[in-house]
């Protein structure tokens, strides 16, 4: 038995422009039906060339579709006006259909019809000044002469919730990228909550503020336990106080959250 060729002689040919307009499956089926007119006789009726096509034959030409998919694509082409299907005359195992290219030209005529009346409307330029005058009046009422235009106010934010808890993502970020143990970060929740609840300040990014608070406390603990500064040398008390003040200023800087 001779081996079956990987690429058969018959190939599918369809228009890429048509596929972009109506869909790939619709373009493939429409092109196959159009090719059948060259080999099978058709009947002229109502200005269309009607063709009897067996469903089994179409499925043989297009074996990657099942009967339900074939019928769905036929219905889609019919809804687009590209295919006419006579469901009353055709047998159950065949299709009586005709390619109808006339509806493609009809929308162009329909869209030109209302444009004929546009020149008459364009000859009356009165509505345009009326719109500009209305816009000017609205602005003149909104802003009085010599008055300053108010700037948008900043977001007021919300106070820290009394049951604030850091997110799991924040705890993982602190441990993975900043070396802060999860247990140490959880120990800072009480001090962080008391501090901001007593201040009564409103904010937006409490998770980020908690991250800054934990980083500050962790750095201070590391310095106090080792007494070594970032350069690897033992620092004096004045140097540690200067460094702590810098970290504290970074913690309390909220300009990024405004």
Image (spheres, grey):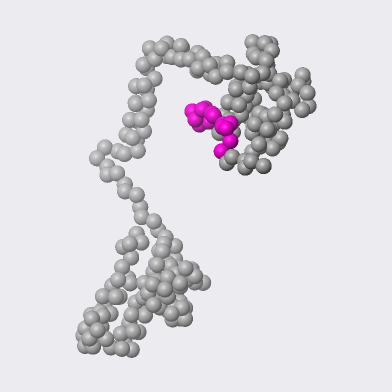
Q: Position of residue 61 (x, y in %)?
A: 65, 31
Magenta stretch secondary structure, dominant: loop
Task: Tell me if residue 19 is in the magenta stretch.
Answer: yes
Residue at (30, 38) in percent of width and height: 144
Residue at (64, 19) in percent of width and height: 39
Task: Tell me if residue 256 is in the magenta stretch.
Answer: no
Image quarter of residue 23: top right
Q: Position of residue 170 (x, y in %)?
A: 44, 69
Image quarter of residue 141: top left
Evaluate whether residue 213 shows in this view: no
Q: Is residue 28 left or right of residue 214?
A: right
Q: Position of residue 194 (x, y in %)?
A: 44, 76
Q: Is residue 248 above or below residue 17?
A: below
Q: Which residues are magenta?
A: 7-21
Image quadrant holding the N terminus, namely top right
Evaluate whether residue 67 shows in this view: yes
Residue at (41, 64) in percent of width and height: 205
Residue at (31, 62) in percent of width and height: 255
């Amino acid at each position: 038995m001779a081996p079956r060729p990987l690429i058969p002689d018959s190939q599918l040919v369809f228009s890429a422009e048509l596929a972009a307009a109506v869909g790939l499956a619709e373009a493939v089926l429409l092109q196959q039906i159009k090719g059948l007119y060259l080999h099978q006789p058709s009947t002229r009726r109502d200005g269309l060339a009607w063709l009897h096509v067996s469903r089994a034959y179409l499925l043989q030409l297009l074996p990657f579709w099942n009967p339900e998919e074939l019928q769905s694509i036929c219905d889609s082409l019919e809804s687009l006006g590209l295919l006419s299907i006579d469901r009353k005359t055709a047998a159950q195992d065949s299709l009586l259909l005709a390619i109808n290219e006339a509806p493609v030209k009809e929308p162009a005529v329909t869209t030109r019809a209302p444009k004929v009346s546009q020149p008459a409307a364009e000859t009356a330029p009165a509505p345009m000044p009326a719109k500009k005058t209305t816009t000017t009046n609205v602005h003149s009422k909104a802003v009085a002469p010599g008055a300053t235009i108010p700037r948008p106010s900043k977001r007021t934010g919300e106070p820290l919730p009394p049951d604030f808890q850091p997110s799991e993502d924040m705890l993982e970020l602190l441990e993975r990228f900043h070396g802060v143990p999860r247990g140490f970060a959880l120990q800072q929740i009480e001090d962080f909550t008391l501090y901001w609840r007593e201040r009564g300040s409103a904010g937006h990014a409490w998770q980020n503020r908690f991250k800054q608070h934990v980083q500050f406390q962790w750095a201070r603990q590391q310095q106090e336990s080792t007494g070594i500064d970032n350069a690897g040398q033992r620092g004096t008390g004045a140097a540690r106080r200067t460094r702590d003040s810098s970290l504290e200023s970074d913690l309390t800087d909220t300009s990024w959250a405004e």
